[in-house]
Image (tube, rainbow, N blue to C red):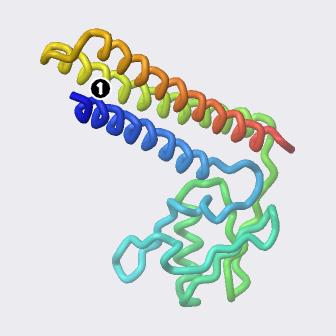
Amino acid sequence: MEEDLELIFDSAKADMDKAVKHLEKELVKIRAGRANPSMLEGVRVDYYGASTPLSQLSNINTPDARTLTVQPWEKKLIPDIEKAILAANLGLNPMNNGEQIIINIPPLTEERRKDLVKRSKSEAEDARVGIRNARKEAMEELKKLGKDGLPEDMEKDAEAKVQKFTDQYVKMVEDILTKKEGEIMAI
């Protein structure tokens, strides 16, 4: 029974951890006014008939807080990369100087900041839902163990432990969201 409980706890923690990691990954894609190479993470370029991530075809750098540079391995890819950045609908306007692509990151308007905060909150809510689903699955497993002979007091203690994990992970999500909102709203 003890190892069954540990298995349930580990599984719940792993699922909750996945939800938090996914949130962090999604929030990186939401720009907070400063240039970040991960902003171009979803851009795919047609390279010899294959849709290839931009990061596999070039170096992406941030020379300053408002500029991204894309240095392709092959200069003939510059027009294709420009098209791909425009097609990705990121609100970015690439320019090339024959050697590399330069992208100036425009400052965010107040309205755009509010939209980004709203999107961040939506991502955080998705993470909370994932955490609650992990809790629900763990609680159902504990109930099954209860029917299979787990003493009631052990079942209650285990449920309290799962709830404690849930509260910890929800707090993590809140902290991550608060930090991201601060970044977005900072001018």
Q: Residue at x 49, y 28 (%)?
A: 128
Q: Nearer the viewer, residue 123 or 128?
A: 128
Task: Identify the image quadrant of residue 97.
Answer: bottom right
- Asked if one can make out residue 115 in the rendered structure from this viewpoint, the answer is no
Q: Is residue 180 above or below residue 93?
A: above
Q: Is residue 49 above or below residue 184?
A: below
Residue underneath mark 1: 137
Query: Residue 91: x, y in percent?
Result: 65, 54
Lateral position of residue 116 relative to residue 48, left or right: right
Lateral position of residue 15 relative to residue 99, left or right: left
Query: Residue 38: x, y in percent?
Result: 60, 61
- Asked if one can make out residue 123 in the rendered structure from this viewpoint, the answer is yes
Q: Residue at x 56, y 46 (%)?
A: 24
Q: Nearer the viewer, residue 88 or 146?
A: 146
Secondary element under disc 1, as helix, strand or loop, is helix
Q: Residue furthest left?
A: 148
